[in-house]
Amino acid sequence: MKGPDPGLSGHFRDKSECVIDLPSWMLPPERLDAYRSTSGLAIVEIAGRDSVAAAVMAVEEEGFTDLLPTYAYTATEYGAWSRVGEAVKRLSARLPETRIHPLIVLGSPRFWQALNGRFMSELIAGYGFLSPCIGCHLYLHSVRIPLAVSLGKIPIISGERERHDNTVKINQISEALDRYQALATEFDIRLLLPLRHISDGQHIREILGFEWEEGQEQLGCALSGNYRGVDGCVQVTIEQTVQYLETFACPVTREIITTYLAVEVPDHLKIAGRVLGSRGESV
């Protein structure tokens, strides 16, 4: 397959609101129609090593014939844009008999901001912590739901894992993954996590069939590791994580996605402010 369209790099740089109105140069109407008639199609979340391994395992387990790679931008990533295209090329090389379609780049920084940035002070006061990683991963899965619905409610494949060798990531604990999947299910979308119970990094390398170190050769995040202390220990509890998701992040995301599916661009900050205010009134 060809590399990603050079226009995607400018699209990634500008990070415009792009969830329901994908430009025709990136997703032409005829291609959209073709996707809707493809029975073995699934969306792949392109990030780093684990996302590619998850796609490989999903094809083996589910028999997908076609994969649509997608990259969702946030507000905090940095690094060489070419890393995303290289991940897609690796996926294509690893699955030569699977059709890997042109990369889609989408996102909404205002959506991300509503979960993680604008109400930071109130969230810290209300929940006793703030780690944008939890809301960020909820955003990364959910921002693809409108596309998945528009293509016939096709599955989304993600590389989330509960454990990474001996490391726990607060945004990928089982309680968080359960809620990411449950929210997708509300919109009749299957969020597939084929690597969920694989903790051994060597097993991931075996699935890939080539060397690729975790966290390498991918875009970085300026907020990486924010929930760890100087000693490396996680400073956020499971209870805090669950409370944040159930009483703020999931309700906000649910309303935002519902609005997108009504073919409207949400007022993300207004929705988040209203949910946060309602929570304060109920305490």
Image (cartoon, rainbow, N blue to C red):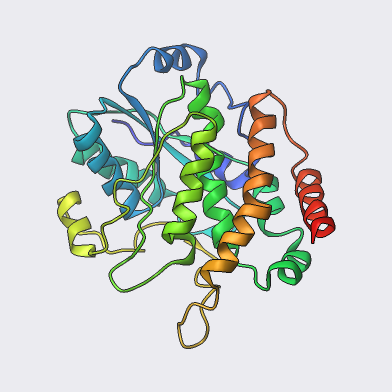
Relative to 110, residue 229 above or below: below
Q: Position of residue 163 (x, y in %)?
A: 34, 65
Q: Is residue 31 left or right of residue 277?
A: left
Q: In this view, does 175 lie above or below 52?
A: below
Q: In this view, does 220 lie to the left or right of 114?
A: left
How many numbered discs? 0
Say whether residue 83 is left or right of residue 105: left
Of the 4 image quadrants, the one containing the N terminus is: top left
Residue 268, image x, y percentages: 74, 43
Furthest toward the front, the residue is 282
Quarter of the C terminus within the rendering: bottom right
Task: Note whether residue 26 is visible.
Answer: no
Left or right, residue 281 beside residue 58:
right
Q: With respect to residue 87, does 69 lie above or below? A: above
Tell me where residue 36 appears, x and y as whole percent: 43, 15
Question: For this rendering, which residue is in front, 127 or 206?
Answer: 127
In terms of depth relative to the viewer, which is nearer, 56 or 184? 184
- The residue that appears at 59% across and 25% down in the rendered structure is 23
Picture quadrant of residue 241? bottom right
Residue at image point 22% right, 56% down = 204
Residue 39 visible to the viewer? yes
Please tell me whether residue 153 is drawn above or below residue 17 in the rendered image: above
Residue 9 position in % (x across, y down) = 51, 42
Q: Which residue is drawn at 49% across and 35% down?
A: 185
